[in-house]
Amino acid sequence: MKAVLLDEKRFATDLARPTPEKITDYVTFEETPQDNKTIIERCQDADIMINGSLRIEREVIEALPNLKLIQLLSVGSNHIDKQACADNDVKLLNAPDFASATVAEHTMMLLLSAMRASIHYHNKVKSGEWKEKGRADIIDAEAIDLEGLTIGMIGIGDIGKRITKLAKAYDMNVLWAERQGRKPRNDDYTDFETVLSNSDVITIHCPLTEETKHLINQDTLSKMSKKPLLVNVARGKIVDSEALASAVKQEQILGYATDVFENEPAGENDPIVQLANEGHPRIILTPHMGAGSRASQVKLWKIITRQINDFIENN
C-alpha cells in the first residue's frame, strides 16, 4: 500500500522514524499548505494519508478514490470530516494518549508561570528595569502559592488524571467537573456549576465538540466567583476568546494561560495575544506545542506505525 505523510516538519529532523514495514510505497512532504487542491494532488494515489493538523474536508476525501485510512498525528480529530469518512468507507485513526505526560507537565508549567507572573518578571530583568529601579519598585504582581488552592478540571481523561497527581503534590484540592447540565456520575465528580464557582484554577482538557464549543463564554465566566486562573491545553474554540479577554480586563478572572487559540496560528489581532502585548502579567502563551516533546514524538511514531501495520494486515 502507498502512504503519504503530509507534514514531516512536525517531527525533529534527527528523530529516527522507520517506515511501517507493511507500507510498500512511502512519500513524505516536509510541509503541506491548507489547500484542498494541493492535498488532493499529493495524496492522489494514496491508500493511507498520515496527517497532523490539516483540515480534511469532504471535497478532499471524495477526490481520493484509493484512500482507505487517515492516520492522524494527534489525539483530537475535530479537523476531519468524520461523516465524509464514513460515507466513503475511509477509516479514521487518531493517536491515543501519546502525549499525556508531556501535556500534563506543560499544563503545570503554564499554571505556575501565570501564578508567579514569571514571564512578566523575566522581561523586567531582561530589560534592565530591575537594575535601574531595584526589586521593591518592580514587584507589581504578587506570586501566588498553589498550596491549599482548589483546581477544577474540565475533561478527565488520562491527562486530567495525571494533572490530579501533580496538583496533589502541590497540596491543592482537586475537583473533577461533570459535563455541563448533567448530574455527577459518581462521588469522584462535582456538578459543573459548582466547579466554576469554587475553583481558584480551572484547567481545560476536554475534546472540541458541538457541546464544548465556546463552553467558556460570557455566562460561564460570570459564574467563576473566585476569579480563577484559566489554563487551556485542549482546543482554542472551547473558549470564546472575546468574552475571555473582556473578563480579564474587567478582572472577573485572574488571567489565562493557553497553548491553543480560536484561530491558529494566532497573530496580533487575536484578543488574547493583544492582552499579552499590553503586558498583562498573567497571560501566558505558547504556540500549540504542549505535545511536542521528543519523548512524545518517539511514542507517537511507535503508535502510528503499529496502527498502520495492523490496519494493512487486517485489510
Image (cartoon, grey):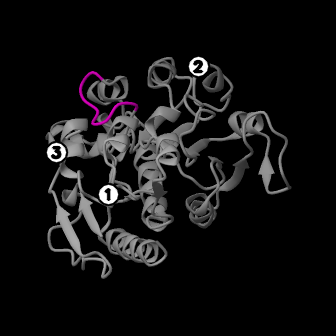
Query: Label 2: how many residues lie within 10 Å, few (<14), some (14-19) or many (20+)?
Result: some
Mark 1 lies on residue: 49
Which residue range is magenta in the image? Answer: 262-269
Can you name the residue that lies furthest to the bottom here?
21
Q: Decide whether residue 140 is among the magenta residues.
A: no
Mark 3 lies on residue: 126
3D distance between C-alphas at marks 3 and 1? 45 Å
* Up/down of 129 relative to 165, above or below: above
160 left or right, relative to 311: right
216 left or right, relative to 93: right
3D distance between C-alphas at marks 3 and 2? 36 Å
3D distance between C-alphas at marks 2 and 1? 39 Å
Q: Nearer the viewer, mark 3 or mark 1?
A: 1
Question: Residue type at mark 1?
Answer: Met
| Label 3 with label 1: CB-CB less than 8 Å | no
Residue 30 drawn at (x, y percent): 14, 56
Q: Which mark is residue 155?
A: none
Q: Nearer the viewer, residue 77 or 258?
A: 77
226 left or right, relative to 235: right
Q: Give the SS element for disc 2.
A: helix
Dominant SS of magenta comes to loop
Mark before the other along the chain sequence, 2 or 1: 1
Q: Give the SS element for disc 1.
A: strand
Residue 132, by quadrant, is: top left
Question: Residue type at mark 2?
Answer: Gln
